[in-house]
Image (spheres, rainbow, N blue to C red):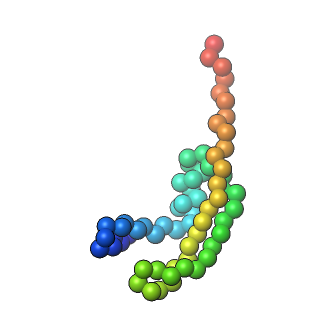
Amino acid sequence: MFQTLDGGVFRHHPPPWLRGLLRAAGFAVLRECRTVVPTLDGRTAERLQLMTRREPAVAGPAPG
């Protein structure tokens, strides 16, 4: 995690951790796109974009 002078806060997380968060929240990953982008300090970093869809909730038994 790091913060810029203008107040921006940035965190870097491993892709499996992000996918796990999405699955736990009911999302399915449909597509991933990885690209290399410049960072604020002129270096490069890998960017991961995840296209997701929220899965419909599974209906439980009707209240009786």
Q: Is residue 7 above or below residue 43?
A: above
Q: How many numbered badges does the structure rendering display?
A: 0
* Residue closer to the observer: 45 or 17: 45
| Left or right relative to 58: residue 19 | left
Q: In which quarter of the image is residue 11?
A: bottom left
- Quadrant of the image for the C terminus? top right
Q: In this view, does 27 lie above or below 50?
A: above
Q: Quadrant of residue 30?
A: bottom right
| Left or right relative to 64: residue 37 | left
Q: Which residue lies furthest to the front in this view?
A: 6
Residue 23 percent across, percent down from the top left: 60, 51
- Quadrant of the image for the N terminus? bottom left
Residue 55 percent across, percent down from the top left: 66, 44
At 53% from the left and 61% from the top, the residue drawn is 17
Q: Which residue lies furthest to the top in this view?
A: 64
Q: In this view, does 8 lie above or below 46?
A: above
Residue 3 percent across, percent down from the top left: 33, 70
Residue 15 percent across, percent down from the top left: 56, 66
Q: Residue furthest right?
A: 30
At 58% from the left and 59% from the top, the residue drawn is 19
Q: Residue furthest left?
A: 5
* Residue closer to the observer: 51 or 1: 51
* Residue closer to the observer: 9 or 26: 9
Q: In this view, does 2 lie above or below 55?
A: below
At 67% from the left and 34% from the top, the residue drawn is 58
At 63% from the left and 73% from the top, the residue drawn is 34
